[in-house]
Image (tube, coloured by chain):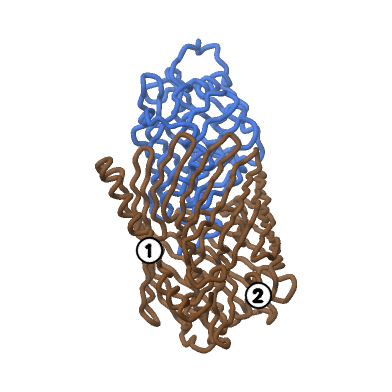
Amino acid sequence: MRNHKWHKSILTTSAALSVILFSISAKAGSESEFDTSQISGFEIAAKSDRSDRGFGSSEVEVRMILKNAAGKETERRLLLSTYEVPSEEIGDKTLVKFTEPKDIRDTALLSFAHILEPDHQWLFLPSVKRVKRISTANKSGPFVGSEFSFEDMTGQELNKYDYKQLESAACGEFQCFRLERTPRYEGSAYSSQIAWVDSEHYQIRKVEYFDRKGDPLKVLRYEDFKLYHGKFWRPHSMKMENLQTGKSTELVFDQFNFDRGLDEKDFTKSSLAQS
Amino acid sequence: MITPEGRQQAEIGKERWWRFAIPFAAASTLLMLMTEPVISNELELGGSISLEYRHFPHRAQWQGQDNKTFTTLIFEPEMNWERSDWRFFAMPSVRSKLKPESTSEVEISELYFKWSGDQTYVQAGIIKIFWGVAESRHLVDVINQWDMSADIDGEDKIGQAALVISRATNIGNFDFLYLPVFRDRKFPTQQERLRPSISIRPSIAVYDGQYENDWRNDFAIRYAGYFGSWDVGLHYFNGLGRDPRLIPIEEGVALAPTYVKLRQMGIDLQYTGDKTLLKLEGVWRNENGQENVALVTGLEHTLFGIGGGSTDIGLVIEYLYDGRREDGIDVPIEPLDNDLFFGTRFAVNDVQDTALLVGFMKDLSNSSLIGAFEFERRIGSRWKLEIEGRWFDDVSDADPLTVYQDDSNITTRLAWYF
């Protein structure tokens, strides 16, 4: 029973998820102080990326809803915990623990994000009690039928792109900067992306993805933002739509909990095995 | 010493671990109930029921093995109860063989109480743990006994009674494990396949020269940590070895599992590169005064997004060496003595987590080649289908696996999770 040897598919799923979710913390900004007429595309991206510091730790339940072209839905559920590492030189630590589907319940993934060197990731496989260090090689391909890929999310890191500021445009109730991002790394599935960053809170509201031929491929929308502790914005829905296949994947977030008192010791290789 | 009377008494005493498990469960539950009331959202219940159908296409090699198909129902409920710094977990396992004969067996897979302090944790009860990095053989993973009646691949573990004290430091984790109870390996019965020519009788097992499976003072020490891209594990084990020799008794009508004292030191090492993992597991053993070494080393390489699609292909190559003596007289016999494992894994990365694993083990000292595949796919959100096959069609007479020569088989398993 449960005689799996490599568990790579679960591995891929959870690894990708952590990356997706990770990007949330990197994106949420809080204030707007810049004179927006002078600001460059890079500075906007930098402000959006850097402004969310000081939240300590957070925990949130997430539903991942995969929808195929015919509208058939499949759901996964997970618990996402994040520990903010104070140093700017080291990325944050995240723990993703699946609760559904039930056959992968308690499967967990611990990630240490790094700025320059590759991330560290360990996967915990509860049926065999195994902790396995896994490769964090970037993947441009989709995973588990989801419309998110690793690249979409690790891609949010500031220095992975060249930026060009396009004309601003309205985005819902806000006015948005539009930043064209061209991947600087190799093997990207995209020729470019357009990130929409609102000029009030510096939150990413939308990202448009263009394939290598330059045709529109996907759109990611961030919605249902809520402000926590008067300073931390969090989207409660992230919906990625594939314009070419009609498939979509939505991440729906429950209430973020910043007061769980999570500590660095809750994010270690050994605590993973004991989770 | 070894007498028939001793044997009888020993048989009565074999299930003594129950006497440990039940009072332990009762006491720890009571303790928790007394200290704090249960809050429903801290208590999780779940588990699985699976039906397993195993078919052997070839006629059996040995007398008594009259059946080609075996059906087993496995019920594994679990209970998890967590508070801020402690946790109680229980997972019994019921294996009911439905066909050809109907028997049931209840095991306590896991049943433990765990307390987590600041840098220290203490775990007591029946546990399952995993050590190591390799895929084809779990050489350093010596704490739990295996259930070879469930499968011969060493992935089915039997819960181990243990007290574990663990300490987290800046360089990694240090564990001390006290192991007071020894569990017998489970083997197929006379009627079942995947056994040697004469049946193995756990009821006449010998433990370090004694018939009585007494309380033990076995222990192990473990270090596990990482340095950059390197994950490092070290261990020392001192106790009764989990691998038995099989000694013919009563003029060769049965085999008596014979467990010997083992002192073992080992290392497990993994380098995690961009797409390639390099792995090494090595042990030095002293078994009944005989010294030997064993090794598994190799790599795992992943090709991501084959053909522009979503499928990943993983390739595993591992070399296995074991210096245990071929005759199995002084130390357990070891089929994976000088072998090469080649495995490939297809992960479709779809919604249903479809995956296929195919592996081959080639003995480098003789002609033996054995193969295995495992397919798995979720159906809906609560069901999972697994199909596994093993074939032994070219096993050398000189290889210990020759006893399985005609036992190639295919297993279909359907599990429902709740």
Q: CA distance from mark 2 to mark 1?
A: 32 Å
Q: Position of residue A125 (x, y in %)?
A: 49, 52
Name the foreground residue: B394 vs B247. B247
Q: Is residue B320 visible?
A: yes
| Image x and y of residue A228, in percent | 36, 24
Between A220 and B294, the one lying in front of the other is: B294
Q: Judging from the image, what secondary structure is the residue with disc 2 in? A: loop
In the current view of this chain or complex, which residue is farthest to the front?
B1
Name the residue: 37% across, 28% down.
A259
Residue type, label 2: Ile
**In the image, which lettered chain appears blue?**
A
Q: Which mark is residue B329?
A: 2
- Where is residue A255 shown, x and y percent of the image? 34, 33
Discs 2 and 1 carry the same chain letter: yes
Give the mark, 2 or 1, whose residue is nearer the N terminus.
Answer: 1
Query: What is the secondary structure assignment of the residue under circle 1?
Result: helix
The residue at the point 39 percent across, 65 percent down is B107
Instruction: Judge whether residue A207 can be spotted in this image.
Output: no
Q: Residue furthest right?
A: B365
Q: Which chain is brown?
A: B
